[in-house]
Image (spheres, rainbow, N blue to C red):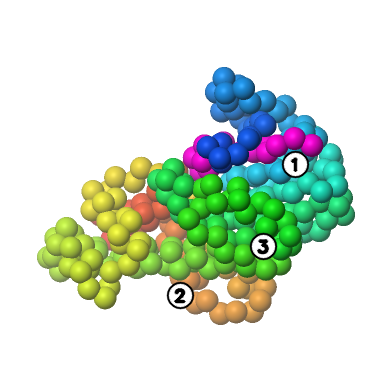
Amino acid sequence: MEGIGFIGLGKMGVPILKNIMRKHQVLGVYNRTATRAQPYAALDMKIFRDPWEVAARCDIIFLMLSDSKAVNEVMHGKKGILGNLGTGKIVVDLSTIHPDDSVRIAAEVRERNAEFIDSPVIGSVPVAEKGELVTVAGGSREAFDAVKPILESFSNRIFYMGLNGSGLKMKLVNNLLMGANLAVLSESLLFGEKLGIPREKQIEILSSGAASSKILELKKEPLLNEDFLPQFLLSHEYKDLNYALDLARSSREPVPISGAIVQFYAAAMSIGLGNLDFSSVLRAFKALRGMS
């Protein structure tokens, strides 16, 4: 067994990988869109042909993929990780997927005498670039302790949550609240404008009192200028909200406010905003009002 393998070179995967590389040896990378992996060949890293080869060569395999479908494909597909996963190896999934899928995959990994950690991260691309993500992990304590020094290379806070799936459950609680905060903030700003208060003045005042929030701090410029350069895709927030609502249904837990809010993200998806930053939900509220 040799080193670390990394799968998933998207907007979040690339800065996370760069931070890992500053402190740890990375043997090689794999990406489903192969052209994204090619620049790493110049760094004397192996470009793996498929996840099966990553599993063959690496002790610790990091995944940073878009959703449950993508993780299942990499784990179970032809030439997938599970087909070549040996004793003592650890798979660390940084993706945000459905907790039920993660628990099932963890059981399959354990059948091969290996370990699986669900370790989703909280934060956007700029936070990832700074190495200041918050990481919430679920899985065996021993496996978590083994990979924690690597998690520290891209995280400024790390929380061990317990059994497999618990890291993802915390991430979904976080994104449920985050999405609700941004939706209500967007609605409030447009309401204030209807009352004749300039958006810039509203943001200045809201930032000064009890209505201030981390989401207002992070998103005030996009909300003011309506420049929705993606830092966290609206389609990913919508996916996470639906995972959270599915968990609420299965646990018979009422979340009526969140259930209503997810419809505004659905509206944003329906008008083609999925590839913009999730702060573009503001445009869904504008569309509701007939505003351009």
User: Which residue is label 2 attached to?
Assistant: 257
Question: In x, y percent, where is residue 221?
Answer: 26, 51
**Picture coordinates of residue 283, whole percent (x, y):** 33, 53
Q: Distance between the Cα atoms at labels 2 and 1? A: 44 Å
Relative side of 150 to 236, left or right: right
Looking at the image, is 45 positioned above or below residue 251?
above
Residue 3 in sight from this viewpoint: yes
In the image, residue 212 lies in the stretch drawn in magenta: no
Q: Which of marks 3 and 1 precedes in the sequence?
A: 1
Picture coordinates of residue 279, whole percent (x, y): 36, 54
* Secondary element type, mark 1: loop
Q: Is residue 6 above or below residue 161?
A: above
Q: Could you tell me the amino acid type at mark 2?
A: Ile
Q: Quadrant of residue 195?
A: bottom left
- Separation of residues labelled 1 and 3 (CA atoms): 19 Å
Tell me which label, 2 or 3, sits earlier in the chain: 3
Circle 3 is placed at which residue position? Answer: 138
Say which of 126 and 78 sits in front.
126
Residue 150 position (above or below residue 200): above
- Say which element carries label 2: helix
Question: Residue at (21%, 62%) from the top-left corner?
Answer: 203
Residue drawn at (51%, 53%) of the image? 155
| Quarter that holds the N terminus | top right
Question: Is residue 114 rendered to the left or right of residue 69?
Answer: right
**Residue type (three-letter) at the residue carrying disc 1:** Asp
Q: Which mark is residue 36?
A: none
Please tell me which residue is depicted at 56% across the width and 80% down the height of the picture.
Answer: 254
* 227 up-or-down from 249: above or below: above
Magenta residues?
Answer: 1-19
